[in-house]
Image (spheres, rainbow, N blue to C red):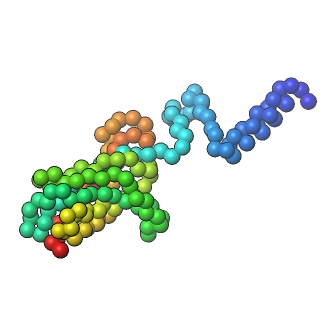
Amino acid sequence: MDYKKCLEKINMFLGFILGLLGVCSCDKSKDPWNEVCYYGTPYAKYEVTGAVLNTEGESIQGIQITSQELYTDGNSIIHIEEMRDTAYTDSKGDYQLKGNRFFGQNKLRVIASDPSNTYTADTLEIDLLHSDKDKGGWVTGTEIGTADFTLKHK
């Protein structure tokens, strides 16, 4: 066997082993879409805004807003991931919840709860829409949504 064929077989074997381990490489000159290759799980920025009012239409300050990422199979929820991002409503009852989440899931459960225990908690499931707010490749931009709450006194 000649030297060149031996190296080809070694390269194929090593490529197979590295592929099993999840290691890959990209050659931009051979990439037909001229895209940068990413490794790992891409994430997306998200931003949810909204307002929290009581049943009389008055804004409520200090309401805690959290979220859960919902994984679906198209019809039903198959997994719920607790998010670590938290926001609180300001004096006008407005909030802005920002953070990072896994790319590709566009459903979010937003939870409004009252730390003072005056109002009952409420949840909304919302769809996030991709925005080109931040320009760049396929894993850039921000997914945005709105969730407004009306909380009842306990």
| Identity of the residue drawn at 46% across and 64% down | 79
Q: Position of residue 89 (x, y in %)?
A: 19, 54
Is residue 7 placed above or below 49 in the rendered structure? Answer: above
Q: Quadrant of residue 111?
A: bottom left
Can residue 126 be seen here? The reply is no
Q: Nearer the viewer, residue 48 or 2?
A: 48
Q: Residue at x 22, y 70 (%)?
A: 120
Q: Residue furthest bottom?
A: 154
Q: Is residue 41 above or below residue 80?
A: above
Residue sticking out furthest to the front: 116
Quadrant into which the C terminus falls: bottom left
Residue placed furthest toward the right:
1
Image quadrant in which the N terminus is located: top right
Query: Residue 115, percent across and down?
Result: 23, 62
Residue 152 placement (x, y as % from top left): 16, 71
Q: Residue at x 34, y 51 (%)?
A: 85
Q: Is residue 91 left or right of residue 128?
A: left
Q: Is residue 64 visible?
A: yes
Percent across and percent down for residue 124 are 28, 65
**Horizontal arrangement in the rendering, residue 13 relative to residue 43 (left or right):** right
The mark total stands at 0
Q: Residue at x 28, y 66 (%)?
A: 123
**Front one among 150 and 76:** 150
Left or right, residue 56 beside residue 15: left
Instruction: Please tell me whether residue 61 is drawn above or below residue 100 in the rendered image.
Output: below
